[in-house]
């Protein structure tokens, strides 16, 4: 987690005495989707040494984007280093291996897991190659290599982002857990968040990885497990817990298919004191760039979000963008 630092705000934003942020309230883990006996324990499909954050790190369960505008993301997208090994999250049997439906030349592996009389399925997509011993009906052990994570590319400078344009290459796999005793309406009706199923060791590793993740929807959908039922326009309010920034910030997305945000700065009373649009560059490292742009004011800065806590350092246009989060204001939101 980044160190804290002083944030400057526009003179229109009332300042409050600097407060020391209290410890982050513990998050309530999402409940298991079923009460049927037989709970699968899963590891992560990645070794710590294979994790990368050049593009996003982890894209969480439930978030909404262009590809998941109506149903919400049905798993975790996990970023790997180039050549990173995708591993079985639990012992089981290979259910199927088939060409990836989204990316030509890539593969999907499905494993079936039986706990008592309870069936689960784990899915691993965008594999550039599959190991020869991963074939239907073959038994696999937890942690066994399945294949190599495939490489994708994205434009760095897209509408609503900041910084130098170019193409970013990264490797990733979509990791999905299906509880075959559980059903919901809509696409992927069996998909559930892997979060409550993680072993203690996997949860410890996940927390370390999650601390470095950054993805555009997190201003509104910041958790590892977000509701797939979110409807748009959607907003989230962050309240100051420490530092000298505005008392609150509310972000709004009008549609799930567009990455553009609007913002409102809030006074202690909750009154809106400034509005405008948001520009992001989440691929900036070590901290994503954020610009708040309005007709009468503006702020440039950097930020870091980990679940219900955001550290935000802002300056005004014409000033140099902060280099780190030393002295940043701390904001929190409810789960």
Image (spheres, grey):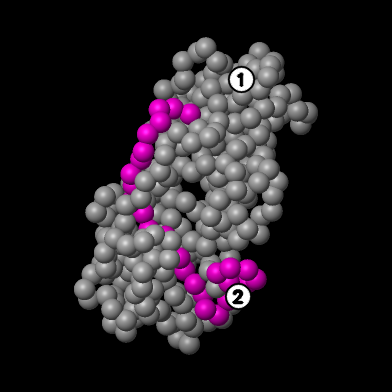
Q: Nearer the viewer, residue 255 or 204?
A: 255
- The local secondary structure at tag 1 comes to strand
Q: Is residue 208 above or below residue 293?
A: below
Label 1, on which residue? Answer: 298
User: Which label number is shown at residue 183?
Assistant: 2
Whether 136 is among the magenta residues is no
What residue occupies the far front of the structure in this picture?
Answer: 104
Q: Is residue 135 above or below residue 274?
A: below
Whether 165 is among the magenta residues is yes
Lower position in the chain sequence, tag 2 or tag 1: 2
Magenta region, residue range: 162-189
Residue 107 at x, y percent in the picture: 34, 66
Which residue is depicted at the point 66% across and 46% down?
Answer: 255
Count of numbered circles on the image:
2
Q: Is residue 168 above or below residue 321?
A: below
Which residue is depicted at the point 66% across and 55% down?
Answer: 230
The answer to whether residue 67 is left or right of residue 138 is right
Residue 274 at x, y percent in the picture: 71, 24
The answer to whether residue 33 is left or right of residue 108 is right
Which residue is depicted at the point 47% across and 20% down?
Answer: 321
- The local secondary structure at tag 2 comes to loop
Q: Is residue 272 visible?
A: yes
Which residue is depicted at the point 33% across and 63% down?
Answer: 106
Residue 96 at x, y percent in the picture: 37, 78
């Amino acid at each position: 987690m980044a160190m804290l630092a002083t944030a400057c705000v526009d003179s229109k934003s009332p300042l409050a005495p600097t407060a020391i942020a209290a410890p982050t309230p513990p998050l309530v883990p999402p409940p298991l989707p079923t009460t049927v006996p037989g709970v699968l324990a899963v590891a992560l499909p990645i070794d710590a040494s294979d994790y990368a954050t050049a593009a996003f790190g982890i894209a969480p369960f439930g978030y909404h984007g262009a590809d998941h505008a109506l149903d919400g993301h049905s798993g975790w997208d996990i970023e790997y280093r180039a050549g990173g090994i995708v591993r079985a999250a639990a012992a089981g049997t290979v259910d199927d291996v088939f060409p990836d439906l989204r990316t030509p030349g890539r593969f999907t592996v499905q494993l079936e897991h039986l706990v008592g009389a309870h069936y689960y399925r784990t899915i691993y997509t965008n594999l550039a190659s599959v190991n020869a011993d991963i074939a239907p009906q073959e038994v696999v052990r937890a942690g066994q290599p399945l294949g190599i994570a495939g490489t994708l590319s994205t434009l760095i400078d897209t509408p609503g982002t900041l910084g130098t344009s170019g193409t970013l290459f990264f490797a990733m796999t979509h990791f999905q857990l299906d509880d075959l005793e559980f059903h919901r309406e809509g696409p992927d009706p069996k998909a559930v968040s892997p979060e409550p199923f993680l072993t203690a060791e996997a949860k410890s590793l996940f927390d370390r990885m999650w601390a470095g993740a950054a993805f555009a929807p997190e201003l509104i959908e910041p958790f590892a497990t977000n509701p797939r039922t979110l409807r748009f326009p959607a907003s989230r309010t962050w309240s100051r817990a420490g530092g000298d920034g505005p008392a609150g910030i509310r972000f709004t997305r009008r549609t799930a298919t567009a990455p553009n945000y609007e913002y409102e700065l809030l006074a202690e009373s909750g009154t809106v004191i400034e509005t405008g649009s948001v520009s992001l560059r989440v691929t900036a490292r070590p901290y994503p760039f954020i610009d708040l742009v309005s007709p009468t004011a503006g702020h440039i800065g950097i930020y870091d979000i980990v679940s219900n806590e955001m550290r935000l350092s802002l300056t005004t246009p014409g000033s140099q963008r902060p280099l780190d989060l030393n002295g940043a204001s701390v904001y929190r939101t409810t789960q």
